[in-house]
Amino acid sequence: MSEVGKLPRVEVLGTPVSVSTFEAALGMIAAMVGRRAGEYVSCANAYSLSLALDDPAYRQTLAGAAAVSADGMSVVWALRALGHPCERVHNDDLFLAACELRRPWRHFLVGGREGQPEAVASALAMRVPGIQVVGMRATPRRPVPRDEHASIVAAIREARPDIAWVGMGTPAQDEWMREAAPATGVPMVGVGSAFDLLAGRTSAAPEWMKRSGLQWLFRLAQEPRRLARRYLYHNSRFATAFARQYARHVRQR
């Protein structure tokens, strides 16, 4: 890292992705909390980077994040192929680790279906006795309607959390955080599927599947109707586009 709380970035398919270890990512979030920064952390996987290829506005949203973690193994492999050793920084795991290691923090939960943030808070209380969840709001409609957005921002300001965890899925959570983080002055981290996992709606993939880059297949088996196009189309698109980027990288080297 070039300076405290900052992570170097490398472009993958035109989107700057943070090169980091898991420990360094935790340190970056702690630095954000320490300086009360109204910034946000997004995550990069094959799906999000494929979306950003075709959507300049979304690509700009990712570029505006304080960090874009290498959330998927395909992105980790891409960074390594470009000559940048790094670890996978899965934001679900980052969420749980921060809750366990930074117990004095005050947490706010945003996202999920009605009742889901409450279920997540209960699960966290069992995992981390004494955790301070100072507020929560479900977001069953995506994108979040303007009146609801204003209400959530006001609730966060009133609760004065140290950090907000946002589980709306990609790209909704990134687009919402881009506007909400500076409006609240609270650091925010997108946690994707973490709320579904903690609330018991879905199950976590085995560790060997995560390490092998097969977590997408495990999730597809659980939610085939919702995730079929996301994985089958966007994973292929990511692979094809990165093959072109890697070929350019080899020629230039």
Image (cartoon, helix red, strand yellow):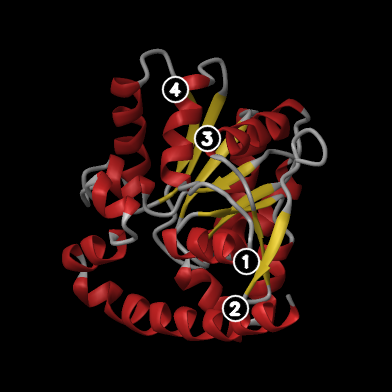
Work out whether residue 144 can be spotted: no
Which amino acid, by three-letter code, is at mark 2? Tyr
Q: Name the residue beneath numbered marker 3.
A: 108
Distance Cα–Cα, label 4 vs label 3? 15 Å
Q: Which of marks 2 and 3 is nearer the N terminus?
A: 3
Residue drawn at point x = 53 percent, y = 30 percent:
107
| Separation (CA) of disc 1 from disc 4 | 33 Å
Select label 1 or label 4 by which is in front: 1
Give the structural element (helix, strand or loop) at label 4: helix
Residue 100 tag number: 4
Under circle 1, the secondary element is loop
For mark 4, does the 10 Å Cα neighbourhood hold few (<14), some (14 to 19), or many (20 or more) residues?
some
Please state which of the two labelled residues, at mark 2 or mark 4, is closer to the viewer: 2
Q: CB under 8 Å between callouts 2 and 1?
A: yes
Q: How far apart are the alpha carbons under marks 2 and 3?
A: 40 Å
Query: Alpha-carbon distance for marks 2 and 4?
Result: 38 Å
- Mark 4 or mark 3, earlier in chain: 4
Image quadrant occupied by the N terminus: top right
Label 3 secondary element: strand
Dot 4 amino acid type: Glu
User: Residue 13: in sight, yes or no?
Assistant: yes
Q: Toward which corner of the image does residue 251 lie, by quadrant?
A: bottom right
Q: Which mark is residue 82?
A: 1
Q: What residue type is labelled 3?
A: Phe
